[in-house]
Image (cartoon, grey):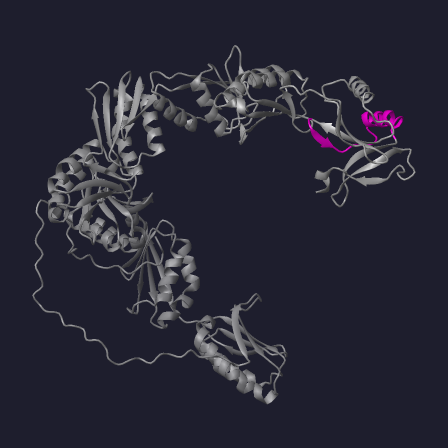
Amino acid sequence: MSAARRRKTSARPNTKVSSTPASGADDLPELEPLEEELDVLEPVDDELPELEPIEDDSPVKVSHGASDEEGFGVRVDVTVPDMDKKAVLDAVGGPLQRFAARDGDALRFREVVVVFGGEAMIGSAVKNLVEETLAPCRPRKLVVRRGFGDELLHEGELPKAALEARRDGGRTTISIDDTQCAPKDVPFAIEGALAAAAAQATEQHIEVSFASGAAPHRTTVAALEGAFSNAKSLRIDGDVRFDRELEARVVAESSDGTTTIHVDTSADAATIDAALDLVLPGLARTLAGRDIALQATAHALTEAQVNRLVGAATTAGAAVVRMVRRDDEDDVLVPALLRAAAAEDGSRAALQVQPGGRGESAVIAAFRREVGAHRDLLRGREVTVDWPAGYALSPVLETACLGDLLLAQGPKSIACSFGGADREPFFPAPVQIDEASSPAVVCIDTEAGKPVEVLRAIERRVAPWAAVGSRGKDVRVEFQGQGTVSRSMTRRVLEMFEQGGASRLEAVQDGVSDVILPPLLKSESAGGEVTLTPAAAGRTPEQVDAALAREIDAADWPANGAFKITEPDDLADRLAALLAARGAARVVVGTTEPVQVHPSLFGPLEADGQQLKLHACPGPDEEAVRAQIEREVPMLLAAREDLATHDVTLVWPHGRKGDPLVQATLAAIQAAGPGRVLLEGTGRARQVFPQIRLDYVSVLGRRDAEEAPLILLGIDVCPEDEDTDAHLARVLEKLGLVDVDGRRVLLIGRDEGRDLAVDPADALFGAVCTAAQERAAATLVFRGADRHGRPHFEVQGSKLEALPVGTRVGDPRPSARS
């Protein structure tokens, strides 16, 4: 308790009577109204002028503080800037006077040194000014320092007052003769004697009286309270300033929003009243906005004492006041349990419940007592009962307060919230359970509230039954209405019955059935791979798809992990597709002959008119790739109609016709019956089926009428899968059968009927040019288009003067000229 205590006030009857009787009181007396009419206070019409602040714009500054010099208690600094010596006196006078008026009490009976500083010359006349201005402040000693050493201006005397202390056991009586001393000077007059008395005050009850009979000045009271703070009690002129023993009888303890006021009732009523007088005025801040518990130690408080405590608590703004009972439930004195209000549109109403520390039976009793008063407001409306945040609404409270008492008031619907949040529907019943049917049926009204609100109702009603009543049973959960069924709701229902041990769980919504238990997928993890064993367990195809999507979504498998599906079937294919869409790094189907289905060997089949393309992305495991070929090629081509009219191109990076895996793929494609099969591996796509017959050397054109006849020969390039030496031999053999004697021979590379520009350094064409030149007049090779886009030939060998080696001539074919 603060040493600076208010003066004691007499206890008056509290006119605010609690609705709960205090202990030992059956009937409270009715309060009589005052018959006298009180005068009405008239407002003051005169407007008071506003006080203008005084702006101290003087260049002279005066400040003070404690002095650290021996012999002085206070130092006053006067700073005077550079000015004419004659102006100093006038400049200093005003600021010094204002200082004396404002802070003069700080100099009272103290040793004061006034120090002048700044640039101005301080004349001796200033000494008189300082003495005249500050001496009335009654310093004990006044010294000025202006650059000429210390100059004593004034010496005063301490005020006279006598202090006499008489000690009798644990009580000390202090008598102060203040008849020769001004009231506010008493602390200075008794300073030494007071310190000596205070040193002996420990464990004493101190009573102070004054000879003058005048009320002690506040400075005197503060000095006494400070000096005797170690005493048991202090009374000044009969006014109790503090009393440690009385204070110990009324103790407030605060914890977690509740303040408990413990009242020691082992003394007589007068002592308890005195303790209340002393302590209650100082508890206002402690009680404000708190829940208050009143607890008597020995015997019950009197009615008047309870009223005083309740009055103090409610005046301070306490939220709840209750009386703690030893052998029974606490009595809540304030506030009322229920507060009701209707929404502006009139369709809804709120009923706020404030238990105020009431237990279950007390809440039910108060609910029964109060709810009828709100009947007109609740009837026909959507009612939300708001309980405190975190309040445990037990089945007993739900049945008694909501099912019986509130429902009897005729509301349209009932919901509960807790601290204005976590709304939950209660009536009409959002959940109904039929345990006797087979399977047991749980009906959930999805329109009873928002999904999160319905989920709270499920937690309250379904979870307890699922934990004890569903073990070994088949259960069907029917979501009725057009409300949303969230994933979290479905997941939570699954958890409830899975933990409760239900043998089968079926969820029905909008006529669609989803079998949740037993799980469709059994999973095991080992070595960084997840093995999945699907079991349809009597599910329809639609139920299988729903279960796959739900269980994969809820699983905690690594999204980019490796998976093995034990049995290759349609279910495995759907599961693999879902895992791949989820981001699986690898999916293998089968255990005895495993096949990797993701990543697949081939991408989607590309179609452009009659042209189909298969893009291969083979892995390093040849056996795994061969299994993928056998699985994927028939699947990709089986769905194509009229495949015989299509060309299928196999795109295999760096693949050659002779590679075993490429051969296997080409064979599988050919077995599907396409019109043509092409391979695109190291270059452009080449036809591999039907096999193309080579002409080796073909005459593409000739002109015999010219002076130097011309012949145009197509030379087939060597296919990548044939022997180059054998190919060259066949070309030279056929070239020998062609009449090139004395002719200009134009050579064009040919690849599956397409013209190719010739590289003179190519071994095939180098040999052909050499062989032809032995008989020909000139040998030219096709070089493709020049930088202007004109196709042309270049002379490689010549016997004609007009056609030297290196000469370029245009393509003589009409199609080239056009």
Q: For the view shown, which residue lies furthest in the bottom direction?
A: 86
* Residue ID at (27%, 28%): 511
* Residue ID at (40%, 58%): 227
Please report the bounds of the magenta region as a residue range: 752-776
The foreground one among 581 and 748 is: 748
Q: Is residue 738 above or below residue 90?
A: above
Place of residue 673 in the rendered image (x, y in percent of width and height, measured from the top left): 54, 18
Tag count? 0
- Quarter of the picture containing the C terminus is top right
* Residue ID at (47%, 23%): 639
Place of residue 189 in the rendered image (x, y in percent of width and height, measured from the top left): 41, 68
Q: In this view, does 594 lie above or below 44?
A: above
Place of residue 96 in the rendered image (x, y in percent of width and height, measured from the top left): 50, 80
Magenta stretch: residue 556 in it? no
The foreground one among 422 and 447 is: 447
Residue 207: name its quadrant. bottom left
* Residue ID at (45%, 76%): 137
Magenta stretch: residue 763 in it? yes
Q: Is residue 615 left or right of residue 522?
A: right
Residue 709: name its quadrant. top right
The foreground one among 721 and 44 is: 721
Q: For the view shown, which residue lies furthest in the front direction?
A: 705
The foreground one among 763 and 273 is: 763
Q: For the view shown, which residue lies furthest in the top direction?
A: 592
Residue 180: name its quadrant. bottom left
Work out whether residue 502 can be spotted.
Answer: no
Work out whether residue 68 can be spotted.
Answer: yes
Place of residue 167 in the rendered image (x, y in percent of width and height, measured from the top left): 34, 54
